[in-house]
Image: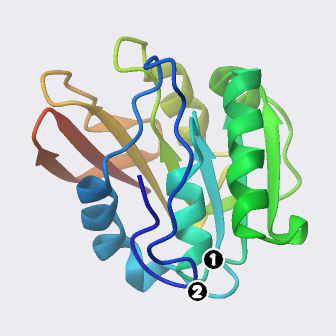
Amino acid sequence: MRVIAGLYRGRILKSPADGKTRPTSDRLRETLFNILAPRIGDESRCLDLCAGTGAVGIEAISRGAAFTTFVDKSRKACALIEENLDYLQIPESQTEIICLAAENFTGREHPKGWDIVYFDPPYEIDYSNVLFDFGQPESPLLLENGLLVAEHHSKIALPDAAGHLRRWRILKQGESSLSFYERN
């Protein structure tokens, strides 16, 4: 697995040896960031939720995002993300790593929201609680004009709406799909 483009282009990222983590493929990340490119700027805040290796959040930083929050419930995954960030020498001022389950993270108070959220849980879990948290009218999680992208198995149907979130695009690639949500 490698960084596709930007400042850290071509750099190889460490992957877990256990085979339990399903990293987002290079091809799917490239397609994702072709769509996200106009939304990433030097003030963009990104959230890599169920981050695994941190590849999506690292890609965002490599392409110019100002800050990325990495969240994963696995301590091993959090340690791997830390290793990847250290290897690339990404400044600590651009990142934070939080070891917490996604639904516990989204249910907490947050002083700042995010412009881009990538939610990539294990395919077999229920996505509805996290989507519901982002779709609440008073939710500070997703900033104005923010975008939430949920990766899911192509055979799993996610809702077209979740509270104030509306899906505006589905992209399928192999067994994976990306559902793109915006606040309405």
Where residue 178 appears, as percent x and y from the top left, is 27, 46
* Pointers 2 and 1 in contact (C-beta within 8 Å): yes
Can I make out residue 173 in this image? yes
Residue 65's disc number: 1
Residue flagged by tag 2: what amino acid is it?
Gly
Near-viewer residue (176 or 166): 176
Q: Residues within 10 Å of mark 2 (few under 14, many from 20)?
A: some
Where the C terminus falls, by quadrant?
bottom left
- Identify the residue shown where x is 57% and y is 84%: 7
Quadrant of residue 23 within the rendered picture: top left
Give the Cα distance between marks 2 and 1: 6 Å
- Where residue 99 sits, quadrant-wise, is top right
User: What residue is shown at x 16% (from left), y 52% (from top)?
Assistant: 171
Considering only vertical position in the picture, is 35 above or below 165?
Answer: below
Tell me if mark 1 has few (under 14), some (14-19) or many (20+) residues whose alpha carbon lies within 10 angstroms of its own: many
| Residue 154 coordinates in the image, percent (x, y) | 15, 30
Residue 27 in the image, given as x and y percentages of width and height: 23, 58
The answer to whether residue 117 is visible is no
Secondary element under disc 2, as helix, strand or loop, is loop
Front residue of this view, candidates 55 and 109: 55
Identify which residue is drawn at 77% across, 70% down. 90
Q: Is residue 29 above or below residue 54?
A: below
Vertical position of residue 162 compared to residue 125: above or below:
below
Q: Is residue 13 left or right of residue 82?
A: left
Element assignment for label 1: loop
Q: What type is the residue that disc 1 sits on? A: Ala
Residue located 21% across and 40% down the image = 177
Res 116 quadrant in image: bottom right
Question: What's the mark number on residue 41?
Answer: 2
Q: How is the image coloured?
A: rainbow
